[in-house]
Amino acid sequence: MRRPRPWVIVPGIWNSDPEHWQSVWQDERGAGAVRIEPASWSDPDPADWRDAITRAVRSCPEPPVLVAHSLGVLAVADWLAAAVGTAAGAFLVAPPDPAAPGFPEAAGGFAAPRPLPDGAHVPTRMVVSDDDPYCSVDRATAFARTLGATVLRVGALGHVNVASGVGAWPAGRSLLDDLEDAL
């Protein structure tokens, strides 16, 4: 039987609405999940988000699993590369490509993942949709390689958000459970 680990929820720009799978999962986990609280949701600043992740991780009783979506993936990659804390694992869903035309101008300070320093690797899964409008499969796979992450291709799920119609995304929850079982 798997022992539940704490989660740190790291949404994308503008946060995740109540119908988003991250919010649903957070509600289901209750006190075992904490959401980052940056001051810059709509005009995201990488340093502010890095600090918000650090605060959330420090509020956990043990190293958590980081559960990130969209811009949150880039924030987690930045946090891991900065080696400012410890996580048990990372579940990264639908990374956006900062070099793509659809990348939000407001998030211009965020960059593609960079290699992690020696000793900073954590078990990581990168969930990739075949038709994500914000990142090609090739770029997402390259991001995963940079982070040492296992790629999980989930077919044509768009940006794996409310607009994609995934709802509570039980198949994704199963992928997260698999990661936790492996920790």
Image (cartoon, rainbow, N blue to C red):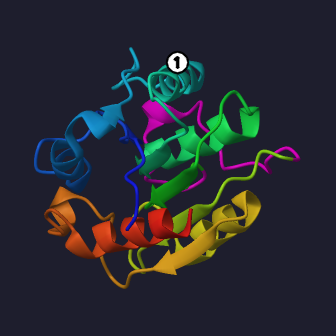
Please give the residue where the numbered disc 1 appears in the rendered image: 48
Q: Position of residue 52 (x, y in %)?
A: 48, 22
Image quadrant occupied by the N terminus: bottom left
Where 49 sits versus 171, above or below? above
Q: Residue at x 50, y 77 (%)?
A: 152
Image quadrant occupied by the C terminus: bottom right
Taking the image as shown, residue 67 lies to the left or right of residue 151, namely left
Residue density around tag 1, few if under 14, some if 14–19, many if 20 or more, within 10 Å: some
Q: Is residue 122 in view from this perspective?
A: yes
- The chief SS type of the magenta part is loop
Where 4 sits versus 108, above or below? below
Q: Position of residue 103 (x, y in %)?
A: 46, 48
- Is disc 1 placed on a helix, strand or loop? helix
Q: Residue furthest right?
A: 118
Q: Is residue 158 in view from this perspective?
A: no
Q: In the picture, residue 7 is in which quadrant?
A: top left
Q: Residue at x 33, y 63 (%)?
A: 159
Taking the image as shown, residue 13 lies to the left or right of residue 116, namely left
Taking the image as shown, residue 65 lies to the left or right of residue 98, namely left
Q: Is residue 110 magenta?
A: yes
Taking the image as shown, residue 126 lies to the left or right of residue 130, namely right
Where 50 sits versus 97, above or below? above
Q: Amino acid at mark 1?
A: Asp
Magenta stretch, residue numbers: 99-118
Q: Residue at x 33, y 32 (%)?
A: 34
Q: Position of residue 66 (x, y in %)?
A: 48, 46
Residues 1 and 57: in front is 1
Q: In the picture, residue 175 is in which quadrant?
A: bottom left
Q: Residue furthest front?
A: 1
Q: Residue furthest top?
A: 39
Q: Is residue 157 magenta?
A: no
Q: Position of residue 31 (x, y in %)?
A: 25, 33
